[in-house]
Amino acid sequence: MDRATPDAGANASFRRVLDPVDRASEILFGLIMVMTFTSSLSAAQAGRADVKAMLIGALGCNLAWGIIDAVMFFMSSMAERRLSERTFQAVRAADSAIAARRIIADALPALVVPALSAGDLDRIRLHLISLSREEVRARPRAQDFVGALAVFLLIFLLTFPVVAPFLFITNAVIALRVSNVIAIALLFSTGYTLGRHSGHPWRTGLLMVAVGLTLVAIASVLGG
């Protein structure tokens, strides 16, 4: 329903790009992947060739993940547009106002529907009927491409703060320690930011660190 008009579609897409839960999840995944590469480095015995191979692997992995995530974002956005278009068509084709209101109610979140009266649903119905088919036609729009690009950059650029110490510190042991500190700080700050929406920033920040490190350990043990 959010994508019924171009303006609504743009706002919905950008809200999704900035959605704290989705972004926190993607940052967590990106950090886990790059930390899996850095933690696999035997810092005490690593030479420059080993460090170079690790850097190439980490960058390549997050590059691939960024592309995949961007494509999935775009596909999800288009799926929502098609769903909105089908809802619009069903409302216009409904045999009665009661049937149209039922279709609209089914398309809305279950928590929202009880707060809406028949009059509220009818206003939505009249609004949808007033729209042209062109306005709701499911087609790619600029905000979909911008959103996908933002997702890609978020995942790919996240690699650089974690691998940067290996570019500037010749001692691999020290570089790994600095890299781990940066990664943990990023995990905590991501969880802290997410936790501000639930009222528990410190708890969520520490939980994000614990979850991230645990998943990195699991991935490393399983050969990830």
Image (cartoon, rainbow, N blue to C red):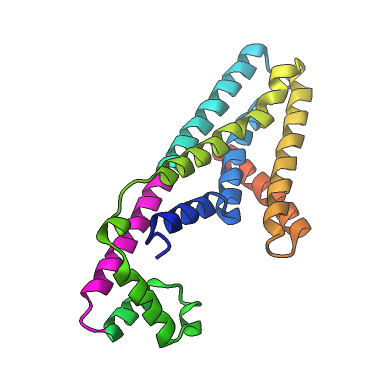
**Image position of 93 (left or right of 54):** left
**Image position of 47 (left or right of 96):** right
> Does the magenta stretch mainly form a helix, a strand or a loop?
helix
Is 85 magenta? The answer is: yes
As drawn, 122 above or below 211: below
Residue closest to the eye, 78 or 201: 78
Q: Number of labelled discs?
A: 0
Residue closest to the eye, 19 or 1: 1
**Image position of 211 (left or right of 22):** right
As drawn, 191 above or below 220: below
Q: Position of residue 15 (x, y in %)?
A: 53, 54
Residue closest to the eye, 102 or 92: 92
**Image position of 160 (left or right of 129):** right
Q: Position of residue 108 (x, y in %)?
A: 42, 73
Which quarter of the rendered picture does the N terminus lie within? bottom left
Q: Residue at x 56, y 46 (%)?
A: 26
Residue closest to the eye, 194 or 166: 194
Q: Which residues are magenta?
A: 73-96
Q: Position of residue 142 (x, y in %)?
A: 41, 43
Which quarter of the rendered picture does the C terminus lie within? top right
Q: Position of residue 136 (x, y in %)?
A: 31, 59
Q: Quadrant of residue 168?
A: top right
Q: Residue at x 33, y 81 (%)?
A: 102
Q: Is residue 45 visible to us here?
A: no
Q: Residue at x 75, y 53 (%)?
A: 206
Residue farthest along the top direction in this orientation: 48
Q: Residue at x 62, y 39 (%)?
A: 31
Q: Is residue 105 visible to us here?
A: yes
